[in-house]
Amino acid sequence: MNPRFLIALTMLGLTFASPLRAQGWDASRQATGWAYQEVDGSLVFYDPAARSLRTWMKGSGLLGSLPVAMPQPDKAPQAKKPTVLAAPKPATDYEAAGALLYGIPRHQLSRPASAAPQDQRVVPGAAGVSPERWVVDPYNRIWMACEGQLVVLGKDGKTELVLPLATTVEDMAVLRDGVLLLYRTLKPVLEKRDLRTGDVLWTFGDRVQTREASAQPLRVPLNRMALGLDGTIYIAEGASLAFTVLDPAKGPKEPGQSFFTCQGAMPARPVLGRVGRGPLLAWPGRDVIFGAFASSQVRSCGAPESKGLLLARFNLGNGTLDWLPTAVGEGHRLVGLLETEAVFLAPEGGLVFAPIH
């Protein structure tokens, strides 16, 4: 387990006190939802039944628990007043743009609400509310995206910040000097947030898309993000098997591109279809990023036949792409990478492992 997070748990008196408690929750059977992977390979899950973050490692089991005890809405820090946004484009134009860019069927786009949006500020930890994404920053604070808000818990367990979000967050990542938020939009929109204030330091992409996505949410992810060994940001856009490359300090200034060849040739683009784009994860300690695809998505991309999901291994050092078939069925989601195994979350909960090399 990452020493930073363990120290934080110890300070709060939240590490388990007995073997029985340690055996009470097992990610291999009970894990659900998003997972954040620490550099040591441990995974941080949210347990909705106990309203706690659970830190778990294969071979060691449950390492610690941190209850997500947020203040009630009347005692929560005041969120910044959101900017009044212009009315979104008509739904027909939005759908047409999605179909033109990605071939997105209409069923993948949620219909806009018929009534005007109401102020529904919800605090994570309240009954029936669960955080959707979370990461641990270098100061042992937990950053959570939940119900349209960015919530920061200090290492003392108290809420430090509650800020509004433009729309649904697809991916989160931590840098040495900031937190990255990739929104669920047609084309990538990425923010870097200040660790102290939560303010936006820079934005990559057209923020107008966040207004459109907020009014008419996408049902599947189209863009994903992962970090390289040195904090370099890699963004996969739509069905592309190339990455947009951003310097973590410069952000949108001087973006680059990283292309990959498969068996000596440029691979064709996958067909995202009803599934959308799967997660991108960096392999700890290696200059490699993995992505997961359904076999039906990559039949024209030089991928071998597989009865399960296929892992795309993007070798950043030499610009090559390898395909690794797995026995993991479609519907499973890539959540972690260990020394020799990829970790998948099963649709009904629990973990499944597949060998990697």
Image: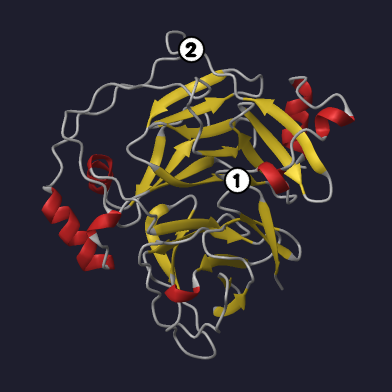
Tell me if residue 199 comes above or below residue 207 in the rendering.
above
Residue type highlighted by circle 2: Gln
Residue type highlighted by circle 1: Ala
Is the residue marked by circle 1 packed among few (<14), some (14-19), or many (20+) residues within 10 Å? many
> Any mark on residue 72, and which?
2
Residue drawn at (43%, 62%), measured in percent from left and top? 277
| Left or right placement of residue 231 versus residue 258 in this view | right
* Viewer-closest of 233 and 183: 183
Quarter of the figure with residue 93: bottom left
Outermost residue to the top = 74
- Asked if the residues shown at circle 1 and circle 2 are in contact, with their CB atoms under 8 angstroms apart, the answer is no
Residue drawn at (54%, 89%), measured in percent from left and top? 263
Tell me if residue 94 comes above or below residue 341 in the rendering.
above
* Viewer-closest of 233 and 87: 87
Residue drawn at (35%, 67%), measured in percent from left and top? 273
Q: Where is residue 74 in the image (x, y as percent from the top left)?
A: 42, 8
Is the residue marked by circle 2 packed among few (<14), some (14-19), or many (20+) residues within 10 Å? few
Q: Give the secondary structure at mark 2.
A: loop
Which image quadrant: the N terminus? top right
Outermost residue to the right = 19
Q: Where is residue 282 in the image (x, y as percent from the top left)?
A: 61, 60
Which of disc 2 and disc 1 is earlier in sequence? 1
Number of marks in the image? 2
Which image quadrant: the C terminus? bottom right
Outermost residue to the front = 348
Q: Give the secondary structure at mark 1.
A: strand
Tell me if residue 296 comes above or below residue 163 in the rendering.
below
According to the picture, the residue beneath numbered tag 1 turns out to be 35
Residue drawn at (23%, 58%), measured in percent from left and top? 106
Outermost residue to the bottom = 264
Separation of marks 1 and 2 at Cα, in angstroms:
25 Å
| Left or right placement of residue 66 versus residue 112 in this view | right
